[in-house]
Image (tube, rainbow, N blue to C red):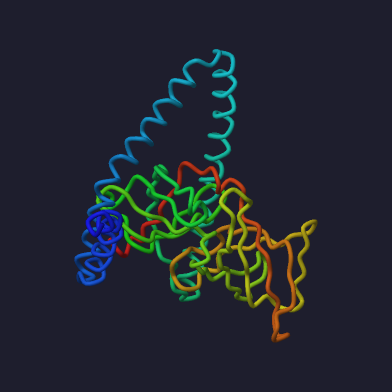
């Protein structure tokens, strides 16, 4: 009778021993095991992402020639537009440098743009983190800002040999100094608690009492540049609703994030030049 009961309880005893050993083992050992497991899993994620890219390539090869010609014409128009924007940006950068030198103002941190493909997003934490296909092999530092065409994506949280984990701006653990476009007063942006497949939202605090926002008349929220992590002027989202805070001194707002954040496949890491 006793051997039968022991056989039934054997899985629970084994699980208890594993948990006990995990609690007793030093933190450095557990961190080493965690990183080793991630480095072992990373090539599988990268291979799956590469296979998807190859699949997309061959699916495009099957499209009619007329569609490819139209896409090429649209791409030529975009290239012409971007070339004009680059020239204008170079002119503005020269003007900013001249004014900084004239007024003896400190320069903003310079960045090197490092494009990277998204390899994986965890469905259980869809709005928490994503994994990109560049790491220490491209000198990606921890804390580097990550952006895309719609504005801020997030910030690099962990760096591994060939991949990096990015904490998204929809992550409630991420805070960013911000301000309303056209207004210099400082606000605080924080990610919200979002369902896996619902629209991403965030929150903002310390909104001045004279600021109003509605879904029909939203206010654009951008980075302020305070803190030295994110450059100023990067889009965070749209403030669609504000309510008075409990202290009555400020308002708190609801921020609607860019819907393209859910399907982003290509990002850019801003690597500070000074860190290199």
Q: Nearer the viewer, residue 16 or 94?
A: 16
Q: Position of residue 254 (x, y in %)?
A: 68, 65
The image shows a total of numbered marks equal to 0
- Is residue 190 visible from the viewing direction of this image? yes
Left/right placement of residue 196 relative to residue 145 reads right
Relative vertical location of residue 235 with respect to residue 176 in this rendering, above or below: above
Left/right placement of residue 8 relative to residue 81 reads left
- Is residue 139 visible from the viewing direction of this image? no
Q: Where is the C terminus found, in terms of image quarters?
A: bottom left
Measuring 20% from the left and 71% from the top, which residue is drawn there? 26
Q: Where is the N terminus found, in terms of image quarters?
A: bottom left
Q: Return the residue found at the far front.
A: 1
Q: Return the residue found at the far right.
A: 216
Q: Position of residue 9 (x, y in %)?
A: 29, 58
Measuring 36% from the left and 35% from the top, which residue is drawn there? 48
Q: Position of residue 13 (x, y in %)?
A: 26, 62
Measuring 65% from the left and 64% from the top, which residue is drawn there? 181
Left/right placement of residue 270 relative to residue 137 reads right
Measuring 68% from the left and 75% from the top, which residue is drawn there? 207
Relative vertical location of residue 87 with respect to residue 179 in this rendering, above or below: above
Relative vertical location of residue 17 with respect to residue 45 in this rendering, above or below: below
Quarter of image, res 8: bottom left
Quarter of image, res 182: bottom right
Relative vertical location of residue 136 with respect to residue 206 in this rendering, above or below: above
């Amino acid at each position: 009778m006793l051997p039968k009961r022991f056989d039934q309880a054997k899985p629970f005893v084994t699980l208890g021993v594993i948990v006990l050993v995990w609690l007793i083992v030093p933190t450095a050992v557990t961190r080493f095991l965690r990183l080793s497991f991630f480095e072992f899993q990373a090539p599988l994620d990268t291979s799956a992402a590469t296979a998807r890219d190859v699949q997309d390539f061959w699916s495009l090869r099957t499209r009619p020639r007329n569609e490819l010609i139209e896409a090429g014409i649209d791409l030529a128009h975009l290239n012409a537009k971007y070339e004009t924007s680059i020239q204008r940006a170079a002119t503005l950068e020269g003007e900013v440098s001249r004014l900084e030198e004239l007024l003896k103002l400190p320069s903003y941190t310079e960045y090197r743009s490092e494009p990277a493909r998204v390899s994986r997003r965890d469905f259980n934490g869809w709005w928490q983190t994503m994994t990109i296909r560049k790491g220490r092999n491209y000198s990606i530092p921890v804390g580097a800002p990550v952006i895309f065409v719609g504005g801020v994506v997030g910030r690099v949280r962990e760096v591994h040999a060939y991949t990096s984990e990015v904490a998204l701006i929809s992550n409630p653990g991420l805070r960013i100094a911000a301000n309303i476009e056209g207004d210099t007063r400082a606000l605080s942006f924080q990610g919200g608690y979002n369902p896996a497949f619902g629209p991403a939202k965030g929150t903002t605090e310390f909104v001045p009492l004279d600021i109003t926002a509605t879904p029909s008349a939203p206010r654009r929220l951008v980075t302020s540049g305070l803190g030295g992590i994110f450059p100023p002027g990067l889009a965070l989202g749209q403030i669609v609703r504000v309510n008075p805070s409990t202290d009555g001194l400020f308002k708190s707002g609801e921020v609607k994030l860019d819907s393209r954040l859910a399907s982003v496949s290509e990002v850019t890491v801003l690597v500070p030049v000074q860190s290199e």
